[in-house]
Image (spheres, rainbow, N blue to C red):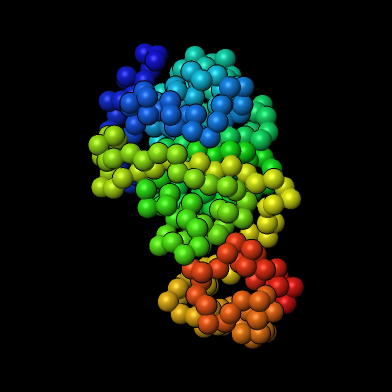
Amino acid sequence: MTDETPRLTEAPARKALGQHFLFDPDILRRTALASGPVEGRTVIEVGPGPGGLTRALLNEGVGKLICVEADERFASALETWPEAANGRLRVYQRDARKINWISIIEESGGSLPAMIVANLPYNVGTPLLVDWLKTGDWRGEMALMFQKEVAERIVAGPGTPHYGRLAVLTHAVCDAHIAFTLPPGAFKPPPKVDSAVAVLTPLAPDRRFADLDTLEKVSTAAFGQRRKMLRASLKALAKTRGIDATTWLESCNIDPTARAETLTQDEFRALAETLAKA
């Protein structure tokens, strides 16, 4: 570990940015490698903070590391690292929610597909993930630290308590599992909940579902009133396309009295496909 990291650790976390920092070298290495070897790869890290995971990724042989950090304290400090001077590390002081990812990968001289490995700020993790799920072939494997409950919602399957819109969108384009969990005490400052690293691996092109925007509309409507039967929860969405919800469901061989948490990925895809054609 270089001299830069200890100095950065003195900077306090900012609650408004959802910052919770990791310093344990073993945990940082496990996170860096959770989605597979990073040697020679282009990797994106969002919210590097004091640079613990950044250093772990560089130590594991990342070819090009692109860090996006909204906090000027950490962005400026990371730019002084030797790897920034030689071009292996590229630092952007920006809001990750407003990034054109393809542009910064090209600008940085990165290669595709780019991995994403990050201890995500809690307040932006879910919207960032949804945006990344909807992107094209530039995105490769992801290893992302979330609050444990969010990670469980990402990997959940039908009939489980955490199954919802996020799982439907995730499994439309990725396989997903939880690599490991961490207690609050692993972080500084400690959050109020456990955390977990979710690993998402892109599906083969012929297994991916292309129309995630329509899939998101269907799953949002279905789970928005999850205690209701599908014919009721999807009624308003069906009406916007001039179709009857019961007829729509039956055309997909889905029981109109079923509830959203029972539907499989294939059934959600069927609903999205038929809605798009309506």
- The number of numbered badges drawn on the structure is 0
Decide if residue 229 is on the left or right side of residue 138.
left
Decide if residue 198 is on the left or right side of residue 13.
right
- In front: 187, or 152? 152
Quadrant where the image shows the C terminus: bottom right
Q: Position of residue 239 (x, y in %)?
A: 62, 83
Q: Position of residue 191 (x, y in %)?
A: 28, 44
- In front: 52, or 262? 262
Q: Is residue 161 above or below residue 82?
A: below
Q: Position of residue 81 (x, y in %)?
A: 46, 17
Q: Tell me what residue is drawn at x 55 percent, y 31 percent.
A: 36
Q: Tell me what residue is drawn at x 40 percent, y 14 percent.
A: 2
Q: Is residue 146 above or below residue 227?
A: above
Q: Position of residue 169 (x, y in %)?
A: 57, 57
- In front: 49, or 120? 120
- In front: 152, or 10? 152
Q: Tell me what residue is drawn at x 32 percent, y 19 percent.
A: 6
Quadrant where the image shows the N terminus: top left
Q: Would residue 10 be visible to someone looking at this image?
A: yes
Q: Would residue 239 be visible to someone looking at this image?
A: no
Decide if residue 223 is on the left or right side of residue 252.
left
Q: Tell me what residue is drawn at x 55 percent, y 19 percent.
A: 61
